Image: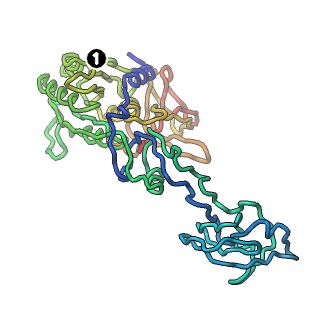
């Protein structure tokens, strides 16, 4: 049985990111959550021109370098420059221009004096304090120089990036296509949420949980539905899934029961199984297999995860999410983020497997604190999984972490 770290390393080594040439598409600025596939440059400087950072007066520093309260510089106001209006005059010695925030600096001006530091009327202004060259002036191209890289590939496009693209007049961008993820649930006991439950039946919540998980991670969920525990039905459904998707997520059928056929079917279909079980709780039964590409189909990564709903989501957060990040073309680290936190509750484990306990991570007075969700921490208890934003980790070999002690906590975050 593999350790969590061994399993994570194997999975990430198996993942081949989408091709930056073949697996891309051009989209408009309606691109929230997409992964940039090519560098973006703009033909505009930022700022586009020298402009004022304050309401005040555009001046020549040479005209006010000797001024003081007893002998203020008296300047002629030659024009008013609101934002969006092109200056009509160049400043000559002894002149100033009334200017507002964002207004274009007139030729000859080299600083702005804030209006609260001046006295005057429409025709003249008195300045009593010298100012530095360039004071309160946003210089053209000081934020960004036209023609240089503006955004680099591998980043997720969210509100700030899309705002920047719009400001740079880059209305079409190249992004990676969405990773296609087929989702199937195995089990004779499963029914859809609209059915009346018969004795022994269970609603298939995994189909909805995993579809949401995939969408939150920028993928395209392809729901296959419920597949009964029959080898022929399973083989047909799995074969169809691996032929149409980049990744397959199946729940159930990967343990050692009489009706657990998934591993056998994957081998029959030509899959190479890299992982069969991991020393983790919840989520010990974890099958990871690859299907190499050939002339008929592209490569596919298969995750067979437990059917218990908590185990399924914990497996996705811990193992599937890093794979989706790397596969989708994202740059940077793909591994989960862990922080140190003080636990408010006593944490228990058997010590035999790396144990993940779900709850809430909060920042308190500059430090992190973790609190278990109330109720039974059972892999079948979806009720107290709600509102989870973190998983506390009890290492192998440790059976208890006392309240008030420090613990490693994995943050659960949506990449979008």
Q: Residues within 10 Å of mark 1 (few under 14, many from 20)?
A: some
Quarter of the image where one finds residue 243: top left
Q: Which residue is drawn at 67% across and 78% down?
A: 78
Residue bearing the label numbered 1: 272
Q: Residue at x 18, y 37 (%)?
A: 225
Q: Which residue is drawn at 28% across and 36% down?
A: 180
Residue at the outermost right position: 70
Q: In the shown orientation, is residue 378 left or right of residue 266?
A: right
Q: Whole-percent x and y of residue 397?
A: 49, 19
Is residue 363 positioned above or below 251 on the image? Answer: below
Q: Whole-percent x and y of residue 200?
A: 17, 34
Q: Which residue occupies the foreground of this view, 274 or 313?
A: 274
Q: Whole-percent x and y of residue 175?
A: 37, 42
Q: Which residue occupies the foreground of this view, 306 or 215?
A: 215
For the N terminus, the quadrant is: top left
Q: In the shown orientation, is residue 318 left or right of residue 246?
A: right
Q: Which residue occupies the foreground of this view, 370 or 306?
A: 306
For the C terminus, the quadrant is: top left
Is residue 154 positioned above or below 319 on the image? Answer: below
Is residue 56 positioned above or below 142 on the image? Answer: below
Quarter of the image where one finds residue 312: top left
Quarter of the image where one finds residue 126: bottom right
Residue 151 visible here? yes
What element does badge 1 sit on? strand
């Amino acid at each position: 049985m593999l350790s969590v770290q061994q399993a994570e390393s194997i999975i990430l080594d198996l993942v081949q990111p989408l091709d930056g040439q073949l697996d891309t598409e051009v989209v408009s600025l309606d691109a929230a959550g997409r992964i940039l596939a090519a560098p973006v440059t703009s033909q505009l400087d930022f700022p586009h021109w020298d402009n004022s950072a304050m309401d005040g007066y555009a001046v020549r520093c040479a005209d006010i370098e000797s001024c003081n309260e007893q002998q203020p510089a008296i300047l002629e106001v030659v024009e008013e420059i609101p934002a969006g209006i092109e200056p009509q005059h160049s400043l000559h010695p002894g002149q100033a221009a009334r200017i507002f925030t964002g207004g274009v600096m007139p030729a000859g001006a080299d600083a702005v004096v804030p209006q609260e530091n001046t006295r005057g009327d429409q025709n003249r202004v008195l300045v009593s304090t010298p100012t530095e060259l360039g004071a309160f002036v946003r210089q053209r191209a000081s934020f960004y120089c036209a023609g240089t890289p503006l955004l680099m590939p591998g980043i997720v496009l969210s509100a700030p990036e899309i705002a920047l693209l719009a400001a740079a007049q880059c209305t079409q961008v190249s992004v990676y296509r969405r990773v296609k993820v087929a989702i199937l649930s195995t089990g004779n006991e499963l029914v859809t949420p609209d059915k009346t439950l018969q004795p022994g039946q269970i609603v298939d919540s995994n189909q909805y949980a995993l579809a949401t998980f995939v969408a939150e991670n920028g993928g395209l969920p392809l729901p296959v539905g419920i597949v009964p525990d029959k080898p022929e039905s399973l083989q047909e459904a799995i074969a169809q899934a691996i032929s149409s998707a980049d990744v397959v997520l199946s729940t159930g059928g990967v343990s050692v029961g009489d009706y657990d056929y998934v591993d056998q079917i994957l081998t029959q279909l030509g899959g190479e199984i890299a992982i069969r079980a991991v020393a983790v709780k919840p989520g010990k039964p974890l099958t990871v297999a690859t299907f190499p590409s050939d002339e008929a189909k592209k490569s596919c990564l298969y995750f067979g995860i437990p059917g218990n709903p908590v185990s399924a989501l914990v497996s996705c957060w811990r193992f599937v999410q890093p794979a989706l990040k790397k596969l989708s073309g994202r740059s940077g680290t793909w591994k989960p983020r862990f922080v140190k936190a003080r636990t408010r509750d006593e944490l228990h484990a058997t010590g035999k497997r790396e144990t993940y306990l779900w709850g809430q991570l909060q920042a308190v007075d500059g430090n992190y604190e973790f609190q278990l969700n109330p109720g039974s921490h059972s892999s079948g208890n979806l009720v107290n999984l709600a509102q989870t934003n973190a998983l506390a980790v009890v290492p192998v070999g440790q059976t208890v972490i006392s309240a008030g002690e420090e613990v490693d906590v994995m943050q659960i975050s949506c990449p979008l």
